[in-house]
């Protein structure tokens, strides 16, 4: 089983749509959880941390279910500029980030 | 403004040559990391570096790799004898060291091409 598993997509949605990405992780001892965004051939950029209580940042909502080892990201009112690859990232006990392969999002006009 | 600056942005080298990739933090940090991403693949951990010592390294980080912070500022990744499969984007990252959840901020990367 992969350490962090994501649907590679691509998700092709119209502007204004709501889209959800899911991610599962295998190590129950994982410490922290994040969503990063990566544009083509650029560095990963931290989008948001993910907490068990759920957290929201503008149009973005992240959820963590520790029992199911499942992480989600919801994007509301998609913008063209949201087109990117979204990386589910898990931090282990030694502060090492484990990246998923990413889910590609394409927002069309 | 990037958290760390990486140089060069692109490096082309011949197989068997040594390369040094550099990372310069904006301010003084203690936690540094190197990751790499082969084209079309996921970002992979190479090594973590805390207080001028290696904290952890992956199985990718074999004897051909080394890291240093020679002058207390620049943070370098050296590949002694490059192989074709070393071709990748190499990212330096600095950490916050926050006890309640480390966050990493990446530089813009060095694209290494081994011919």
Image (tube, rainbow, N blue to C red):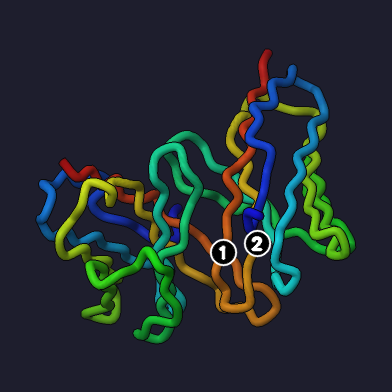
Label 2 SS: strand
Q: Chain of mark 1?
A: A
Q: Looking at this view, is A80 or A72 the one in front? A: A72
**Of residues A99 and B110, which is closer to you in this image?**
A99
Quarter of the C terminus of chain A within the rendering: top right
Q: Quadrant of residue A34?
A: bottom right
Q: Residue A97 has which mark?
A: 1
Q: Badge 1: how crowded within 10 Å, few (<14), some, or many (20+)? A: many
Q: Is residue B63 depicted above or below A33 in this figure? A: below
At x 72%, y 74%, the residue is A29
Q: Secondary structure at mark 1?
A: strand
Please name the residue that numbered disc 2 is placed on: A90
**Residue A48 relative to residue A65: left or right:** left
How crowded is the residue under tag 2: few (<14 C-alpha within 10 Å), some, or many (20+)? many
- Quarter of the image holding residue A58? top right
Q: Could you tell me residue B24's position as x and y percent? A: 32, 65
Confirm or deny contact between disc 1 and disc 2 (CB under 8 A): yes
Q: Position of residue B20 (x, y in %)?
A: 19, 62
Vertical position of residue B101 compared to residue A66: above or below: below
Q: Position of residue A51 (x, y in %)?
A: 81, 63
Q: Residue at x 25, y 54 (%)?
A: B7
């Amino acid at each position: 089983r992969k350490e962090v598993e994501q649907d590679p997509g691509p998700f092709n949605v119209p502007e204004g749509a709501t889209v959800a990405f899911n991610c599962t992780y295998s190590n129950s001892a994982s410490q922290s959880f994040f969503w990063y965004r990566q544009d083509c051939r650029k560095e990963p950029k931290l989008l948001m941390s993910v907490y068990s209580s759920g957290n929201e940042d503008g149009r973005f909502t992240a959820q963590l279910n520790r029992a199911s080892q499942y992480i989600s990201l919801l994007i509301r009112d998609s913008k063209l500029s949201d087109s990117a690859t979204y990386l589910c990232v898990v931090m282990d006990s030694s502060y090492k980030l484990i990246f998923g392969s990413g889910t590609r999002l394409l927002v069309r006009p | 403004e990037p958290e760390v600056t990486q140089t060069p942005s692109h490096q082309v080298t011949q197989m068997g040559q040594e390369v040094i990739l550099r990372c310069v933090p904006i301010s003084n940090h203690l936690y540094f990391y190197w990751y790499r991403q082969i084209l079309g693949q996921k970002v992979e951990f190479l090594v973590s570096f805390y207080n001028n010592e290696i904290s952890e390294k992956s199985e990718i980080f074999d004897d051909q790799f080394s890291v240093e912070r020679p002058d207390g500022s620049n943070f370098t990744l050296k590949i002694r004898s490059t192989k074709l499969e070393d071709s990748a984007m190499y990212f330096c990252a600095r950490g916050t060291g926050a006890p309640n959840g480390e966050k990493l901020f990446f530089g813009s990367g060095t694209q290494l091409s081994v011919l």
